[in-house]
Image (cartoon, rainbow, N blue to C red):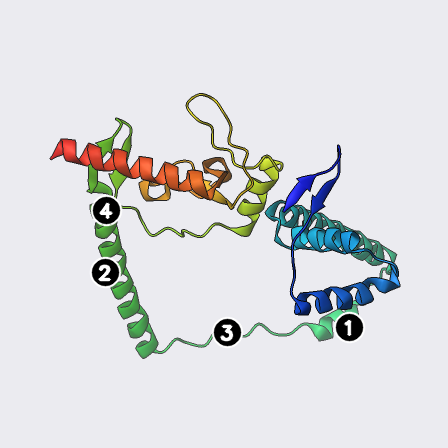
Amino acid sequence: MVKPIGLDRFQVSFSISEATEEKMKKLKGLFAHTNPNMTTEELFEKLIDLGLEKFDPARKASRAMRRLKEADALKSNRGHSAEAARSDEPVQSADPVKQVHSVKPIESPEPVESSQTANSSLLLVKAADVIGSVEKADQTVQSLHAHEIKGSQKFVVPKERARSIAAAVKHAVWRRNQDRGCEFVSDAGEACGSHQALQIDHVNGFALGGSNEVKNLRIICAKHNRFIWKAQMKAAYSAVREKL
């Protein structure tokens, strides 16, 4: 139970098992090198900071960006060092006699066997057939447009797309959120702002052809993610029923 006892102070009270109490003692012993008289409150705060550092997506995004900048800086420094080393090397004068002896005669290419030529031709023919089949299948997929939704969205048969979102894209979405929490805004203009079970969601649904680009992604809580999905599916079902 958490109870406020001051302007910036709260009282936390709960019971723990004997095993948990032993683990707390062990952790205090491990942290004794830096804080020999660690209190339970300090241990609690330390564990919370460690948990946020490990599981907070926004902090993960910041660490990834920091590592990327450090890697770019290291690569740039190595490049400058290599250029400086090359510029310090003495220029060797060319020895025409050694150059003449070091030149190797140009070897004429070996003739290609007729069986290899025949196999290559056969492979080219097969590849052309496969490409033709793929192009026909692609044209068929592009022609399979279904019923419209709200006049603009359409059910389409999508091409093969990866549903997973790249780590760099996820980091960009979390950095853009700036710890604002759920980005869902109601019809009345009220932002949710909850930090409960946050997740990345597609603005234009993936099933409706939405991309995995940063501009098509947002941070919302699990509750509003389910709410939006149900609303989209209901609208899609109603639009299909009207066309039947």
Q: Quadrant of the C terminus?
A: top left
Residue shown at 51% from the left, 28% from the top: 191
Of badges 1 and 2, the one in the foreground is: 2
Instruction: Report whether residue 27 is seen.
Output: yes
Q: Which residue sits furthest left?
A: 244
Residue shown at 76% from the left, 68% from the top: 26
Q: Position of residue 89 (x, y in %)?
A: 86, 60
Q: Which residue is mark 2?
A: 129
- Looking at marks 2 and 3 on the same chain, the residue that comes earlier in the sequence is marked by 3
Q: Position of residue 161 (x, y in %)?
A: 37, 50
Disc 1 is placed on an element classified as: helix
Distance, label 3 to label 1, CA atoms, is 24 Å
- Looking at marks 4 and 2 on the same chain, the residue that comes earlier in the sequence is marked by 2
Q: Position of residue 54 (x, y in %)?
A: 65, 55
Disc 2 is placed on an element classified as: helix
Position of 182 compared to 22: left or right?
left
Decide: few, some or many residues near mark 2? Use Cα within 10 Å; few <14, some 14-19, many ≥20.
few
Distance, label 1 to label 4, CA atoms, is 65 Å
Answer yes or no: do the residues labelled 1 and 2 have beta carbons within 8 Å? no
Of badges 4 and 2, the one in the foreground is: 4
Toward which corner of the image does residue 127 lie, by quadrant? Answer: bottom left
Of badges 2 and 3, the one in the foreground is: 2
Q: Which residue is mark 3?
A: 108
Q: Which is nearer the eye, 235 or 173?
A: 235
The kind of residue on which mark 4 rests is Val
The kind of residue on which mark 3 rests is Ser
Residue shown at 77% from the left, 72% from the top: 98
- Looking at marks 4 and 3 on the same chain, the residue that comes earlier in the sequence is marked by 3
Q: Which residue is mark 1?
A: 98
Q: Which residue is mark 4?
A: 141
